[in-house]
Image (cartoon, rainbow, N blue to C red):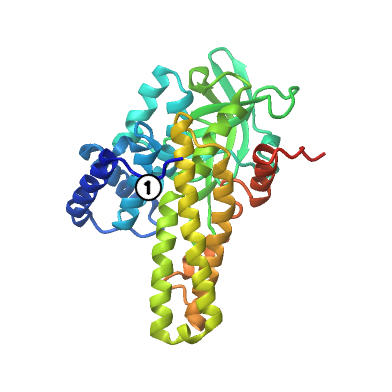
Amino acid sequence: MDLSYTPEEEDFRARLREWLAKALPTLPPKPSPDDWPGRRAYDLGWQRMLYDAGYADVHWDASPTVRLIFLEETERAGAPYVGANFVGLLHAGPTVAAEGTPEQRARWLPPVLRGDEVWCQGFSEPDAGSDLASLRTRAWRDGDDYVVSGSKIWTSHAEVADWCELLVRTDPSAPRHRGITWLAMPMDAPGITVRPLRTLAGSAEFAEVFLDEVRVPVANRVGAENDGWRVTMVTLSFERGTAFVGEVVACRRVLGELAREARRNGRWDDPALRRRLGRLNAEFRALWRLTQWNVSEAEASGGVPGAGGSVFKLRYSHARQELYDTAAAVLGADCLDLGRPWVLDRLSSLSYTIAAGTSQIQRNIVAERILGLPKGR
């Protein structure tokens, strides 16, 4: 395992830093968190800037190490997060790049890179809970189309999306992991109803999606029919492997801000609080090294993150919650003021042990795929 950077990679870092210093001051003001059409336009505009500068394809065509450098530097510079482009850039796009046909890659990847189209994720269902393989949304063949009926929940950015990475059951008689198919569904197809969901933090980036005999071309299937579970594991390896890299950098920055605030408001005198901050500093340093290790492993295995992403996701989810619980201790009574820094972040952190696979699921993956323990019965 080699965690050092080559001269070419350090040159990429230097050029990216120089470009960010020039580009970020030209950005327009950020829209309101509730203005999703405005946020879509803002996020797509940033993606277009990356495309014009030659940085748009780092998530797919660059090495995992260059991707790591890109995410690290953009977060440190305070660049916009991918936002509405999250699913397209970090989940669906890499999956299509890895599993799609040449025609599918030519159709779907360039619009995501240019900032022309937004994707959402249609995986979770109301009755499936954490057991994704128990999904019930049906799809049956009718000529050159699949006809899809069912519902999805927690569908990220569905209200502003052009496409949905959709999991459907195409063979109800097959073992549940073997009857699933991965489809790209156009969100303007007849029969789709989107109902936004408001989170505890007051945002509405998720939605319920109801599908009433929606026709999706068979040509939009990624991978073979009934092989969707394997394709989904590719998607989730990206979601759990490299998608949180920028957030680790952000958490390390927040940790420094918390220490400065504690010194300012006098809570630094509490030895228990100082120990918490010190332990979190060690935690996030270790998570960063784990990120580098995962990237090194992905480099050696062709660019797709492995099961080590579940180790990272499991520990990061809890560390993030601990970080913002510590922020509440630093703020004291002000932790109830939604206008203060870190308060809304604390509310959103509660979802991290559920999003992208619950902690219980991640423990099962680690136990079975890394430790070699038998599956539960």
Task: Report the residue at 61% width, 23% height from top.
Answer: 227
Along the line of sight, the residue nearer the viewer: 118 or 311: 311
Q: Is residue 352 visible?
A: no
Task: Report the residue at 50% width, 49% height from top.
Answer: 290
* Residue extending farthest top: 143
Q: Position of residue 115 (x, y in %)?
A: 31, 38
Along the line of sight, the residue nearer the viewer: 251 or 205: 251
Per the image, the residue denoted by label 1 is 82
Q: Amino acid at mark 1?
A: Val
Q: Is residue 114 left or right of residue 3?
A: left
Task: Report the residue at 41% width, 35% height from top.
Answer: 162
As displayed, is residue 246 above or below residue 309? below
Characterize the local packing of mark 1: few (<14), some (14-19) or many (20 or more) Cα atoms within 10 angstroms: some
* Residue extending farthest right: 377
Q: Is residue 114 visible?
A: yes
Which image quarter: residue 340?
A: bottom left
Q: Position of residue 60 (x, y in %)?
A: 38, 33
Q: Is residue 134 left or right of residue 152?
A: right
Q: Position of residue 348 (x, y in %)?
A: 52, 61
Q: Is residue 161 left or right of residue 28?
A: right
Label 1 sits on a secondary structure element that is loop
Q: Position of residue 172 (x, y in %)?
A: 72, 25
Q: Is residue 37 left or right of residue 313?
A: left
